[in-house]
Amino acid sequence: MAKTLTKAAPTAPAHGEPASGAKGSINLRIEAQTRQLIDDAAAVLGKTRTEFMIDSARAQAIDVLLDQRLFVLDAERYDAFMHALDNPPAPGPKLRALLRRTPAWSR
């Protein structure tokens, strides 16, 4: 059975975004040919242009975020991954040097 590792997505609205439940506005300038293509696709699905664009953008956003946060592994690879996380290698000289450096924000 495959195991899934996920990292929770942030739930707070992004800076400048309306709070949950509030409606914001996005204005786009697109070529007439592209708008017509979107309108035709929306009509096929019985949706408005806005519904189609929101649904499409939401689906794409979910795919992008899951691509960065979702790992599906078979049981053997999951166990190997967890073992590597639980037993990291000893710090080498490059890591030690990095940890001794003063961060840019503290200079």
Image (cartoon, rainbow, N blue to C red):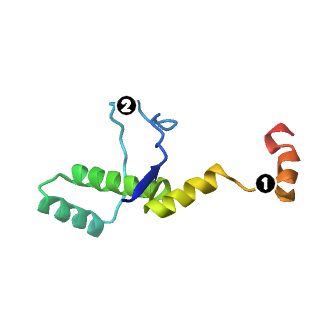
State which quarter of the image contains the N terminus. Answer: bottom left
Percent of width and height locating residue 48: 18, 51
- In depth, the one of 104 and 75 nearer the eye is 75
Q: Secondary structure at mark 1?
A: loop
**What residue do we see at 33% from left, 65% from top?**
31
- In depth, the one of 18 and 8 nearer the eye is 8
Q: Residues within 10 Å of mark 2 (few under 14, many from 20)?
A: few
Who comes first in sequence, dot 2 or dot 1?
2
Q: Which residue is mark 2?
A: 20
Q: Quadrant of residue 93?
A: bottom right
Q: Which residue is mark 1?
A: 90
Relative to 67, does residue 100 appear above or below in the rendering?
A: above
Cα–Cα gap, marks 2 and 1 = 44 Å
Q: Quadrant of residue 107?
A: top right
**What residue do we see at 88% from left, 53% from top?**
97
**What residue do we see at 35% from left, 61% from top?**
30
At label 2, the amino acid type is Ser
In the image: residue 56, left or right of residue 4:
left
Percent of width and height locating residue 17: 45, 36
**What residue do we see at 60% from left, 55% from top?**
83
